[in-house]
């Protein structure tokens, strides 16, 4: 790695850390480039060498946090083996406690400035599922995964749809989604 690469990496890290620190205090739309640059100990021009605006930084921070969480899940191989276990792991597994900065990123008042975040999640989940190696990344499989995952992501993004303390609600959700998985990927669920 050259000195230039190391400087760029350090500068981006400083910008990201400053962004996270400021998100703990205010919503993304209230953060100015001037205060972010001061917090990161850079000038405003340096910020613009790396990001178009504060929202581009926010989008990158969100994608990074989402990718880290998605990569930690063990659910993806279950999609091809046990549809109910996949749904339970995907929707109901205990997530590790989020850091305050991660919670700040995911606040609804911040997420409203990331309208493409569900698409980012969809892409990251599909990438993780394809990485299992049981499903070829074809257009047909992309359509099938998009159909299934969009519904499941909706349940993750709006947790009020499922009462996790109501066993009947959880059972209904698991059965409904697992039937959809088995019908969408019959090649893995033939008797």
Image: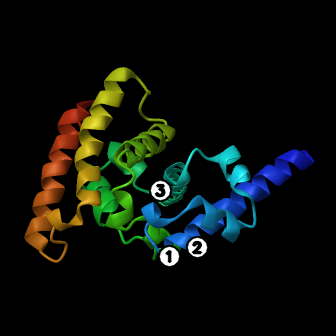
The residue under label 2 is 21
Q: Nearer the viewer, residue 159 or 175?
A: 159
Quadrant showing the C terminus: top left
List the single residue furthest toward the top: 139
List the single residue furthest toward the right: 3
Above or below residue 189? Residue 60 is below
Left or right: 29, with 186 as reference point: right
Cα distance in 3D space between marks 2 and 1: 5 Å
The image position of residue 97, as x and y in percent, is: 45, 77
The secondary structure type at the circle numbered 2 is helix
Q: Which mark is residue 24?
A: 1
Left or right: 183, with 97 as reference point: left
Residue 190 visible? The answer is: no
Above or below residue 95? Residue 146 is above
Report the residue at 49% width, 36% height from top.
Answer: 133
Q: Do the residues labelled 2 and 1 touch (CB within 8 Å)?
A: yes
Left or right: 16, with 129 as reference point: right
Considering only order in the chain, which callout, 3 or 2, is on the residue closer to the N terminus? 2
Cα distance in 3D space between marks 1 and 3: 18 Å
Mark 1 or 3, which is nearer the eye? 1
The residue under label 3 is 66
Above or below residue 131? Residue 143 is above
């Amino acid at each position: 790695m050259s000195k230039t690469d190391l400087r760029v990496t350090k500068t981006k890290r400083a910008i990201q850390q400053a962004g996270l620190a400021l998100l703990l205090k205010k919503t993304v739309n209230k953060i100015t480039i001037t205060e972010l640059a001061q917090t990161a100990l850079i000038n405003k021009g340096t910020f613009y060498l790396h990001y178009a605006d504060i929202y581009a930084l926010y989008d990158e921070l969100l994608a990074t946090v989402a990718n880290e969480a998605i990569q930690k899940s063990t659910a993806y191989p279950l999609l091809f083996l046990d549809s109910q276990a996949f749904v339970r792991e995907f929707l109901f597994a205990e997530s590790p406690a989020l850091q305050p900065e991660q919670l700040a990123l995911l606040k609804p008042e911040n997420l409203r400035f990331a309208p493409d975040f569900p698409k980012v999640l969809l892409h990251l989940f599909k990438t993780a599922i394809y990485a299992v190696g049981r499903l070829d990344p074809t257009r047909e499989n992309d359509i099938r995964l998009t159909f299934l995952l969009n519904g499941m992501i909706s349940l993750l993004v709006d947790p009020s749809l499922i009462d996790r303390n109501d066993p009947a609600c959880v059972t209904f959700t698991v059965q409904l989604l697992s039937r959809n998985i088995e019908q969408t990927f019959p090649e893995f669920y033939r008797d």
